[in-house]
Amino acid sequence: MRRGAGGFWSIVGCAGAAIALPIAEAMAAGAEGGSPGGGSEHADPFSLILVELALVILAAAIGRWLAGALRKPGVLGELALGVLIGNVGYGLGIPFFQALMHLGEVGDIISMVFRTGCSFSEAAAKVLSADALGEGGLGLRLLGILTGPGGREITLMLVAIWLFSNLGVILLLFVVGLETDVDDMLRVGPVATVVAIAGVAVPSVLGFLCGLWFLPDEPMEVHLFVGAILCATSVGITARVLKDLQKIDTAEARVILGAAVIDDVLGLIVLAVVAGIVKTGRLDALAAIKITLLALAFLVGVVWVGSRAVARAVPPLSRAFGSQAKLLLPLCVACVVSWMANLVGLATIVGAFAAGLILHEGLFPEAPTGQVTKTMEELIQPLEAIFAPIFFVLVGMQVNLAVFLDPGTVALACAFTVAAVAGKLTCGLVCGRSVDRLTIGFGMIPRGEVGLIFASVGKGIGVVNAEVFSAMVVMVMVTTFVTPVLMKWSLGRLDQRTRAA
């Protein structure tokens, strides 16, 4: 009893540190002089990143522990602790957390500065609207943070956590791809295609109707974009839940992952078509055809051509690299294929998943008799276990609970959420009897970072206003948070049915 109580208070103390220390560090970074630890001119700026990384990993670990204690999937705890830390820091008015809460806009400004070499002010004028840069506007506040005291350190910390989180989600989808058999994926290909088509078409129609009903005064372009945002699916959330519950090798998991990849392609086509209509006032069929052909060529090329190229290249390279080959070569393949996916307009995580599909243990020479070697998954999973949780903590830290204070936004968000959930549940109705329909529907629900990206595109071209964007953020929050709970319940129900049989 005494040991248990001591363990509990140790966790409580770590939880307090996970909340208080990053806030204190962010306050120090934003203090006069911008240099934590007393403002030493010789302080190593990388030390900030080291502390930031350590504390985010600690927060993720505590979140997983709390979720496990409540018998919930670990990703839910990571998201929840991220929400807590982000909103406490934002509520205290700490510049770092204010910028982090609006990482989409800040990222656009920083990206413009890196690409063109212009100043922050010039970059903000190019990527933000005139209203945002007006007196009291969001853009003006963000610009003040980036160019004010400690702006250099805050920018460095924002870029670092963004890099770590992106690396984490790429590693997650790569490991999921390694654990997925490509032949099994191809066997469920027709079902996954039907599920993906339904998962894009129905939410798009429901979103369009929601826009017509709840936003009658808005132009047709707004209703089209609402439908486009609702068709998105985030494979990262569901993949993490399936891994946590050790269900990645089930038929339901294969259908969901296959459908999510196809959904990503279809979603990009829908987004391109709608964005083209908004910008030009007409349907740009050529752009839609181009995206479709590039996406299909990439996926077919990776699975058929890429697998043969890897089969020829890996064996001689693995003999040259020796014992490190199973770690270094797969990571190189994952990075290159993810980069190629971005070139054709697909998400990098789709490339990471595809890279995992074409790699297998048979590519590497067998170990000498009596020598025990680790598999690719065993070597890469420690990296994934470190970096993937950072992505989910960061998603939680960008959830602004203040949006729930506006009744109009909440009402609109409820409508979008109902349409988003109902639209994806229809996926289960068309998947046949070979898999559990409810599990398939639940697995397609989360919008996650993909929904936020789609909404940001709409906001960037001026078709999505602040009210609609806030409502979409709430929809993304709800669908992201409910999916782990629903998936665990549904998969547990299947286990009980199997044991009873």
Image (cartoon, rainbow, N blue to C red):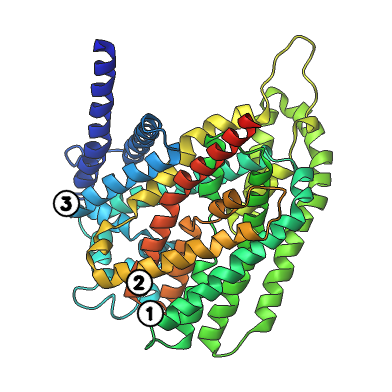
* Circle 1 Cα neighbour tier, 10 Å, few/some/many (<14 / 14–19 / ≥20): some
Q: Position of residue 420 (x, y in %)?
A: 48, 64
- Asked which quadrant contains residue 311, the reply is top right
Q: Secondary structure at mark 2?
A: helix
State the residue position of label 2: 412
Q: Is residue 232 visible?
A: no
Label 2 and label 3: CA atoms lie apart by 28 Å
Q: Nearer the viewer, residue 101 or 9?
A: 9
Tags 1 and 2 touching, CB below 8 Å: yes
* Circle 3 Cα neighbour tier, 10 Å, few/some/many (<14 / 14–19 / ≥20): few
Q: Which mark is residue 214?
A: 1
> Looking at the picture, does residue 134 appear above or below residue 325?
below
Amino acid under disc 2: Leu
Relative placement, left or right, of 149 versus 409 is left
Tags 2 and 3 touching, CB below 8 Å: no
State the residue position of label 3: 92
Amino acid under disc 1: Phe
Label 3 and label 1: CA atoms lie apart by 34 Å
Q: Position of residue 163 (x, y in %)?
A: 46, 48
> Looking at the picture, does residue 356 appear above or below residue 305?
above
Label 1 and label 2: CA atoms lie apart by 7 Å
Residue at 53%, 79% in the rendered image: 275
Q: Nearer the viewer, residue 458 or 319?
A: 458
> In the rendered structure, which disc, 3 or 1, sits on the residue that comes first in sequence?
3
- Asked which quadrant contains residue 286, the reply is bottom right
Residue at 23%, 27% in the rendered image: 13
> In the rendered structure, which disc, 2 or 3, sits on the residue that comes first in sequence?
3
Residue at 64%, 50% in the rendered image: 257
